[in-house]
Image (cartoon, helix red, strand yellow):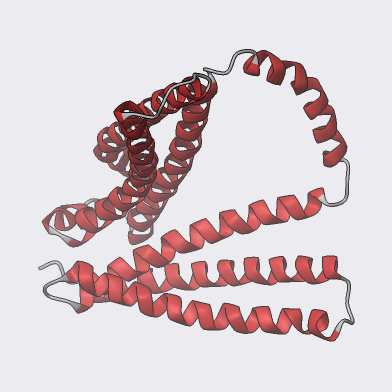
Amino acid sequence: MFTKLLKHEWRAARGVLGLLCLISLSAALLGGSAMRYLVSFSNQDAQAGLGVVLCVLSMIAAIVGIVVCATGIEFFTIWRFYKSRFTDEGYLTFTLPVTTHQILLSSLVTNLIGAVIAIAALIVSFIVFGIVGFSALEGLFPMLWDMMPGIWEKLKLLLQQEELRYVWMLLANSLCGMVCEIVVVMLSVTIGSIIAQKHKILAAIGVYYGIHVGISLVSGTIGILGNLPAITGSADPYGIFSNLLVSQMTLFLVIGVVSYVLMYHFVNRKLNLN
């Protein structure tokens, strides 16, 4: 039943997510075309005119559009969580033969998929932006292609170094932070929807701000304690950095687990859809 619920969530969200990705890619093509014109124009002995101004404005609008689309994907998945759990649609959701854990986890997985799609759309759009924009430079891409073997050899040397461990730790830290952030947002929406009869979204924003103030105080304290050896000059910088990453990752995991337990408690015990 969990799989069916997850499929339903994906079907409800995929249309809007696909549209936002398409808009982001279109903005990248528009901005890249404008950049291509500016690059080709810079090689000519001509004065800047209205076309150059329009191209610059188009590039700025394209960059803003790409970022807005990526942000919109995240906002939409959170909105789907609110609408499908805490509105009239939520009454139907909680009457399904599924557990509260399955209901919450299906939304969590959908939000994680949305986050991955947002990041992918952002990266792909800016790559397309750059490829189209610099395509006006003759010989650029053949030169980059010739450089690829050397770059790959340097990358393999880098992968053999001890510092690669910190790269993996940073990636793991970012992943834990992303999951923690999504769970905290879901908890904020849950608490805001329960404590407020009206203006539930505003209440959720207030709860989210309060939670992050507390998280900032805790993480700041941990950061200061972790940097005490660096302040006194009595420890290895790499060791301090490693300990800081581990402590931050642990904090993310603890906050994520506690937030999910609280969200489950509020939904299972406090939510009243009658």
Of residues 113 and 34, the one drawn nearer to the viewer in this rendering? 34
Residue at image coords 81%, 79%: 230
Q: Position of residue 273 (x, y in %)?
A: 14, 66
Q: Is residue 104 left or right of residue 233?
A: left
Determine the image quadrant of residue 78.
Answer: bottom left
Q: Is residue 28 left or right of residue 127?
A: left
Residue at image coords 45%, 32%: 125
The quarter of the image holding the C terminus is bottom left
Residue 156 in view in this figure? yes
Residue at image coords 20%, 62%: 86
Q: Is residue 149 left or right of residue 64?
A: right
Q: Position of residue 132 (x, y in %)?
A: 48, 22
Q: Position of residue 130 (x, y in %)?
A: 52, 29
Q: Position of residue 236 (x, y in %)?
A: 88, 71
Of residues 51 and 35, the one drawn nearer to the viewer in this rendering? 51
**From what the image shows, is residue 181 above or below residue 151?**
below
Residue at image coords 14%, 71%: 199
**From what the image shows, is residue 151 above or below residue 89?**
above
Residue 267 in view in this figure? no
The quarter of the image holding the N terminus is top left
